[in-house]
Image (cartoon, rainbow, N blue to C red):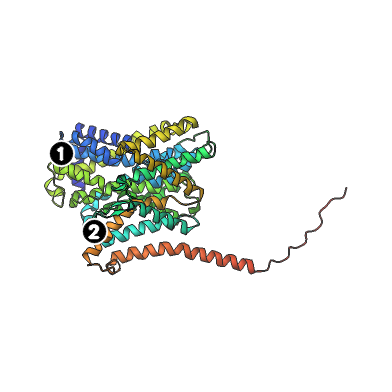
Amino acid sequence: MDALNGLIDGFGVAFTPANLLYVFLGVLMGTVIGMLPGLGPISAISLMIPIAFTMDPVSAIIMLAGVYYGAIFGGSTSSILLNAPGVAGTVATSFDGYPMARQGKAGKALAVAAIASFVGGTAGVIGLMLIAPSLSAVAVSFGPAEYFSLMVLGLTAVVSLSGNNLTKGLISGTVGVMIALIGIDSQTSTQRFTFGQIELFEGVEFLIVALGVFALAEVFVMLVNGGKGSGREGTITTLRLNRRELKDMSGPTGRGSVLGFFIGVLPGAGATVASFLSYSFEKRLAKDGKTFGKGNIKGVAAPESANNAAAVGSFVPLLTLGVPGSGTTAVLLGALLVLGVQPGPLLMTENPDMFWGVVASMYIGNIVLLILNLPLIPLFAKVLKTPQKLLLPLVVVFCVVGVYGQSFSVFDLWLLVAFGVVGFLMRANDFPAAPLILGLILGGLMEKSMRQALLISSGDFSAFVTKPISAALLAVAVLSMTAPLFGAWRRRRKAGRAATTPTPAPAQAPDERIDA
């Protein structure tokens, strides 16, 4: 009853004309910026902070929160249409969303993404409303060892689903972790993989690798194949989903929403880990798992529901503990402190209008996002009708502007081209891109958590297996790697038995010829 009464009071705050306007402006700005590679939610919030400082604190956080989950909501558009994920949380969406667009199903892919995002975001708000205080206590129980094991599980889950060749998946994931380690070590100030280049001292940005391996590599494929690399059909089907498609996406959407919210509650995990874990879980669970990566609706619904639920879930540690769960929530925390609001256990009692007003505004914001995006899907899908001679230069310009606008470095443009070549060679030799991207995202977090755990345990590696949660996560990670090996061994054994079994001679068919 306390939660219900709080929510009613929150709607009283959110339904004021000014706050309704701020919800609309926040989600609109977030959606537009989320569609543009190079401008993620952190950039969007940073741009809006000067405006927020002139506002009432409650209205300011309502608007900034709308920018955050609006950017995650809108980030799937460029992933599906152009295979150019500018936000890390939408990388997994491109695995099946872009193949659907190439098959002329861009409208349906965008509709699935919009509906799954709405369900995931709404489920996340319900979780935030009902069990935020309890989940905050669970989040506190996760130490560095548990976070390291969680990152290992996320990486192995994706590697184990890398198609028929597990070795190539391991190589791809290892290369991703190596890229994440480029730069100056924050603890020892040692240069790692920099080759004396000053531009590499701060490491390699995710955006450069993602746009190179996905978008620019696709351009290279089109050029090599004479413009036929994308395999796009001339027509774009309707965005309407039939009963079978709605049924297919319902299970992954529900499971992704729950999984995404609980992953989002954990500081440091966030929407990226949630989307990859949800995608790998659905691929393993589905009977048609072999069609994932080829345009399966489930492969769009699962990560989209998970990343939006995780985005809302990340507000649990922010509001109840004052602990930012990601880079974006860290920026939000700074904005709150400057506005004179102290997030933490006392926020719900000392400033209930703030907490429940934000929760209620998220319900409204998710509805506004759905109303904004569904009517615009036909307009977005027309991007695929752009002639090939115009589309290729546009994609290249998109990539160049996104990368150069972030750092204003020509060296980063050369890195973009280099990773585009790497992505092209990976496709040519059937190396999966997902483990490389996830290794890049998780590599730094894994190293940081491992060092913290070893520092606490005085260098004792047994800390990773003596703690129950950490040991359980590592055990699941080992199973996720050994299960494909065991399955391959069984298939080879079955094939060997079939080869050694003598084949009976076929029965002679009666002569059915008709004489003239």
In the displayed structure image, the side of residue 201 where residue 100 appears, left or right: right
Q: Residue at x 40, y 47 (%)?
A: 92
Would you say residue 240 is visible in this rendering? Answer: no
Above or below, comparing residue 502 to residue 333 in the picture? below
Q: Quadrant of residue 142?
A: bottom left
Q: Say which of 345 and 14 sits in front.
A: 345
Q: Residue at x 38, y 44 (%)?
A: 210
User: Which residue lies under the disc numbered 2?
Assistant: 138
User: Which residue lies under the disc numbered 1?
Assistant: 57
2 or 1: tag closer to the N-terminus: 1
Where does residue 66 sit, x and y in percent of width and height?
26, 39
**Disc 1 residue type (three-letter):** Pro
Q: Say which of 289 and 337 sits in front.
A: 337
Name the secondary structure under disc 2: helix
**Disc 2 residue type (three-letter):** Val
Q: Quadrant of residue 76?
A: top left
Q: How many marks?
A: 2
**Few, some or many C-alpha atoms within 10 Å of disc 1 (few <14, some 14-19, many ≥20)?**
some
Name the secondary structure under disc 1: helix
Q: Say which of 350 and 169 sits in front.
A: 169
Where does residue 168 sit, x and y in percent of width and height?
46, 56
Would you say residue 135 is visible in this rendering? Answer: yes
Give how far apart the Cα atoms at labels 2 and 1 are.
Answer: 28 Å
In the displayed structure image, the side of residue 270 where residue 49 appears, left or right: left
**Few, some or many C-alpha atoms within 10 Å of disc 2 (few <14, some 14-19, many ≥20)?**
few
Q: Are marks 2 and 1 in contact (CB under 8 Å)?
A: no
In the displayed structure image, the side of residue 184 where residue 164 appears, left or right: right
Task: Using the image, tell me which numbered label, if any, was put on residue 147.
Answer: none
Outermost front residue? 196
Where does residue 411 sit, x and y in percent of width and height?
35, 41
